C-alpha cells in the first residue's frame, strides 16, 4: 500500500460524514442495501472535476460540522450543498477543483443552501471495499474507512492514492448544472403498479399538493407531510423495493425511499422517483416544500441515460 | 397447488417487478429460484440486482446497457417456458444448531402460555418443521422463513427491543428467523443459534438464500457453547 498517502486528519467529525462510492450492487437479494451517494449528481460532478472515473470513493458531508486538516498536497473539488465551506477561513469555491496544502484547514460549517456536500480528491479516498463497495452504511456495519460502517470520527485519517501526474486545478462545472437547492423542486415520479388502487381524490392531491419535508428524513427515506393519501390496498406481501419508491403507509403520509432503504417492504406505492429526483430530494432540509410530477418511462429513462452516459 | 399468473409491473426506470403469485406458499419458491437463475444467465452484465421475495422477483438492470422495453421483452420470453427448480433429494435442509432456553429466548414462556402448552412443546413444534426461506431483508442475511405452527405463532412485541443479540432465533406470526447481527427487533425470542448467518469473508456472504430449506436443531447449552455460541442474556423487552 505504498502508494497511499495521508491527506486529511479529522479534527471535528460533525453529525454525519460518510465515504461513498457508487453503491453496493449484486447483493440486495441477501438483504444488503445499495448505499452510495444520496445525491448522485453532485457526487459525480465532484469526481469529474478532479478527473476521477465514475464510482470513485468521495466523502458525503451532511449538514456540516466537519473540520479537516490537510496533511498532504491534494487536488480537491467540493460540489453539492453550500455548507458554508471555508479553506483557512476563506470561502471555499464550490463546483471547482483546487489545490490544498499541508497545514490548511477545510471546514464545513452549516447548511446555507442544500444539505449534502461532496468532497472528492484525485484518485479517490482509500478504503477497502466490503461486498464489492466502499459505500458506508452504519446500520448494516458495512463499508467506510474501517469497513465496519463507521461514520467519520474525530482523529480519523483520510488517505488517498498518490497520483503520478500533477492534477489539473481550476476545473469548473458550468453554471447550469449547479442547482439552487433552496428553490422548490419538482420531483419526477414514474407511476407504479398500485397507482390505480389510490382513491381518485388522493391521486389528485398527490400531484397537486405542495408537500413539506418532514424531520423524519435520512438516507433510508424521506417522509413528506401533507394531505392524507388513501389507498384501497392495506398491507401487501413484502416485495423488493427500488430506489426512489414512494410508499404510503396507513397514516397516508408518503415516504420516498433512498439509498439506505430496507431491501423489501409491504406498503403500496405511488411509484418511484427518478434517481436524479432522489438526489434532489436528498438536498432538502426538513420543512422545505416539494411537489411531485408524474413522468413517463421513456422520458425518465432518456434523462437518466444521458446523465449516466456523460459520466461513465 | 399454487397457480402461477405472471405479470410484469413497473418498478422505476431501471426495474421491473415480476409478480408470479398472489399468496404466500412454499411451492412458490422453486419457481422464483428458477427465474432468478434464468435472469442471471440471460441479462449477463446488464443485470444490477435481483430481489426475490415470497411471490415476486424485482429485476434491476443497468439502463445504459439495456433499454427498459428490451428488459421487459426478455422477461416475457423467460417466463414463457419457465419450469420450477426440482428439489434435490441428495441435498438436505440447512441445519441451524439452536439452544432453546428462557435466558436467551425470553418469549418461550409467553408463547407456551399463549398456546396453553409447555415450553418443551413450543420447542418441539418449532424444531420439528422444515422451513422454507421466503425472502431476505430487514438486515443483511436476515431470512424470513415459514410457515410456523399456528399454535406458537405469536404476534410481534408491542415495544421492539433496542438490542437483539446476534444469533437470536425468533417467531413473528407464522414466520421464523435468526438475527444475523445485533440489531433492534420486535420478534418473539425463543432461543439462539450458533450458526454464523452472515460473514463478509465467506463466499456468498449469507448462510441462507431464498428458496433454501432450513431446520432448527435443538442442542444443549454445552453443545451450543462448544459450537461457539454466545450465552449472554437478553435485555428486558420493555
Image (cartoon, rainbow, N blue to C red):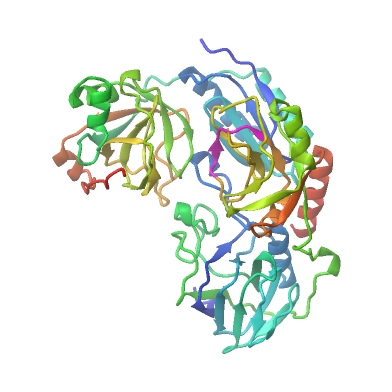
Left or right placement of residue B204 versus residue A86 in this view: left
Q: Taken as a whole, is the magenta stretch helix, strand or loop?
A: loop
Q: Is residue A106 above or below residue B238?
A: below
Q: Residue at x 28, y 39 (%)?
A: B193
Tell me the quarter of the picture where residue B189 sits: top left
Q: Is residue A29 above or below residue A7?
A: above
* The magenta stretch spans residue A266: yes
Residue A287, percent from left and from top: 66, 57
Tell me the quarter of the picture where residue B34 sits: top right
Residue A220, percent from left and from top: 57, 50
Outermost residue to the left: B222
Q: Residue at x 60, y 56 (%)?
A: A36
Q: Nearer the viewer, residue A92 or A147?
A: A92
Outermost residue to the bottom: A103
Residue A254, percent from left and from top: 64, 41
Q: Residue at x 80, y 58 (%)?
A: A310
Residue A213, percent from left and from top: 66, 52
Q: Is residue B84 above or below residue B197?
A: above
- Inspect this view and state whether residue A156 appears: yes
- Inspect this view and state whether residue A166 appears: no
Q: Is residue B122 above or below residue A288?
A: above
Which residues are drawn in magenta? A262-269
Tell me the quarter of the picture where residue B222 sits: top left
Q: Quadrant of the C terminus of chain B?
A: top left
Outermost residue to the front: A227
Left or right placement of residue B21 versus residue B210 in this view: right
Q: Nearer the viewer, residue B197 or A138?
A: A138
* The magenta stretch spans residue B69: no
- Number of callouts in the render? 0
Q: Residue at x 82, y 49 (%)?
A: A303
Amino acid at each position: 500500500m505504498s502508494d497511499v498517502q495521508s491527506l486529511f486528519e479529522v479534527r471535528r467529525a460533525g453529525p454525519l460524514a460518510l465515504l461513498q462510492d457508487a453503491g453496493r450492487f449484486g447483493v440486495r437479494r441477501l438483504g444488503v442495501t445499495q448505499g452510495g451517494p444520496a445525491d448522485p449528481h453532485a457526487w459525480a460532478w465532484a469526481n469529474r472535476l478532479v478527473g476521477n472515473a465514475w464510482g470513485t470513493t468521495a466523502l458525503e458531508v451532511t449538514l456540516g460540522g466537519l473540520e479537516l486538516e490537510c496533511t498532504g498536497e491534494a487536488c480537491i473539488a467540493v460540489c453539492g450543498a453550500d455548507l458554508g465551506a471555508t479553506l483557512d477561513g476563506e470561502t471555499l469555491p464550490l463546483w471547482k477543483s483546487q489545490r490544498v496544502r499541508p497545514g490548511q484547514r477545510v471546514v464545513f460549517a452549516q447548511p446555507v443552501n442544500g444539505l449534502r456536500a461532496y468532497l472528492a480528491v484525485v484518485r479517490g479516498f482509500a478504503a477497502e471495499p466490503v461486498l464489492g463497495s466502499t459505500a458506508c452504511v452504519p446500520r448494516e456495519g458495512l463499508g467506510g474507512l474501517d469497513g465496519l460502517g463507521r461514520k467519520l470520527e474525530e482523529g480519523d485519517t483520510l488517505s488517498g492514492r498518490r497520483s503520478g501526474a500533477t492534477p489539473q486545478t481550476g476545473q469548473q462545472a458550468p453554471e447550469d448544472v449547479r442547482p439552487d437547492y433552496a428553490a422548490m423542486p419538482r420531483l419526477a415520479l414514474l407511476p407504479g403498479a398500485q397507482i390505480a388502487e389510490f382513491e381518485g381524490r388522493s391521486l389528485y392531491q398527490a400531484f397537486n399538493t405542495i408537500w413539506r419535508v418532514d424531520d423524519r428524513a435520512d438516507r433510508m427515506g424521506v417522509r413528506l407531510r401533507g394531505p392524507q393519501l388513501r389507498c384501497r390496498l392495506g398491507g401487501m406481501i413484502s416485495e423488493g423495493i427500488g430506489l426512489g419508491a414512494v410508499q404510503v403507509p396507513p397514516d397516508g403520509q408518503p415516504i420516498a425511499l433512498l439509498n439506505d432503504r430496507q431491501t423489501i417492504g409491504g406498503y403500496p406505492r405511488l411509484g418511484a422517483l427518478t434517481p436524479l429526483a432522489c438526489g434532489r430530494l436528498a438536498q432538502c432540509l426538513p420543512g422545505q416544500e416539494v411537489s411531485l410530477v408524474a413522468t413517463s418511462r421513456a422520458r425518465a429513462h432518456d434523462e437518466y441515460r444521458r446523465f449516466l452516459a456523460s459520466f461513465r | 397447488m399454487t397457480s402461477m399468473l405472471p405479470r410484469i409491473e413497473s418498478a422505476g426506470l431501471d426495474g421491473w417487478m415480476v409478480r408470479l403469485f398472489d399468496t404466500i406458499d412454499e411451492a412458490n419458491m422453486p419457481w422464483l429460484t428458477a427465474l432468478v437463475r434464468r435472469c442471471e444467465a440471460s441479462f449477463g452484465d446488464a443485470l444490477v440486482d435481483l430481489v426475490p421475495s415470497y411471490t415476486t422477483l424485482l429485476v434491476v438492470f443497468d439502463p445504459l446497457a439495456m433499454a427498459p422495453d428490451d428488459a421487459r421483452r426478455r422477461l416475457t420470453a423467460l417466463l414463457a417456458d419457465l419450469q420450477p427448480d426440482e428439489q434435490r433429494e441428495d441435498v438436505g435442509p440447512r441445519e441451524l444448531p439452536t439452544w432453546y432456553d428462557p435466558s436467551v429466548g425470553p418469549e418461550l414462556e409467553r408463547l407456551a402460555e399463549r398456546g396453553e402448552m409447555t415450553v418443551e412443546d413450543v420447542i418441539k413444534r418449532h424444531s420439528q418443521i422444515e422451513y422454507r426461506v421466503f425472502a431476505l431483508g430487514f438486515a443483511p442475511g436476515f431470512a424470513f422463513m415459514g410457515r410456523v405452527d399456528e399454535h406458537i405463532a405469536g404476534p410481534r412485541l408491542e415495544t421492539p427491543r433496542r438490542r437483539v443479540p446476534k444469533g437470536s432465533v425468533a417467531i413473528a406470526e407464522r414466520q421464523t428467523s435468526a438475527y444475523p447481527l445485533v440489531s433492534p427487533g420486535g420478534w418473539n425470542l425463543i432461543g439462539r443459534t450458533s450458526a454464523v448467518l452472515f460473514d463478509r469473508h465467506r463466499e456468498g456472504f449469507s448462510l441462507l438464500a431464498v428458496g433454501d430449506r432450513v431446520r432448527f436443531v435443538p442442542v444443549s447449552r454445552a453443545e451450543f457453547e462448544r459450537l461457539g455460541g454466545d450465552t449472554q442474556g437478553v435485555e428486558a423487552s420493555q
